[in-house]
Image: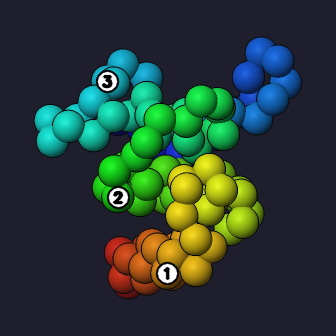
């Protein structure tokens, strides 16, 4: 599973790729729903908290604004800020 690869779609619209062959994980996460949310593709299906976290993580890596991440994931911007802070902390720890 690929997380957060960003590319330009054939329509020249930026697109965030979440998965290429798998549509769900062993624990029931819907990666197609995550990808739709990450790209703001309507209709966005309801996401579990775990799916929202994945979507926020890939959007952050792709440089999406906090406000846009919040809107696409259906959460408050302050929750996005907390989750991104945690992602940054984990990234720093892995580089140490």
Mark 2 / mark 1, whichever is N-terminal: 2
- Seen as rendered, the residue at the extreme left is 26
Q: Position of residue 6 (x, y in %)?
A: 64, 39
Q: At 82% from the left edge and 18% from the top edge, which residue is drawn?
A: 11
Q: Nearer the viewer, mark 3 or mark 1?
A: 1
Residue lying at 27% horizontally and 40% vertically, measured from the top left? 29
Q: Nearer the viewer, residue 75 or 53?
A: 75
Give the residue at mark 3.
22
Q: Are marks 2 and 1 in contact (CB under 8 Å)?
A: no
The residue where tag 2 is placed is 49
Task: Compare residues 66 and 76 and report the one nearer the observer.
Answer: 76
Which residue sits furthest right? Answer: 12
- Mark 3 to mark 1 CA distance (whole Å): 28 Å
How much space separates mark 3 and mark 2, taking CA atoms?
20 Å
Q: Sort mark 3 into few (<14), some (14-19) or many (20+) by Cα contacts within 10 Å.
A: few
Q: Is residue 22 above or below residue 57?
A: above
The residue that mark 1 highlights is: 82
Residue 56 percent location from the top left of the image = 52, 58
């Amino acid at each position: 599973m690929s997380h957060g690869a960003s590319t330009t779609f054939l329509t020249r619209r930026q697109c965030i790729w979440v998965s290429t062959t798998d549509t769900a994980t062993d624990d029931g996460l819907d990666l197609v729903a995550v990808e739709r949310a990450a790209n703001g593709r309507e209709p966005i299906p309801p996401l579990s908290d775990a799916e929202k976290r994945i979507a926020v993580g890939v959007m952050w890596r792709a440089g999406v604004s906090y406000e846009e991440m919040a809107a696409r994931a259906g959460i408050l911007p302050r929750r996005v800020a907390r989750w991104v802070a945690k992602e940054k902390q984990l990234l720093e720890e892995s580089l140490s």
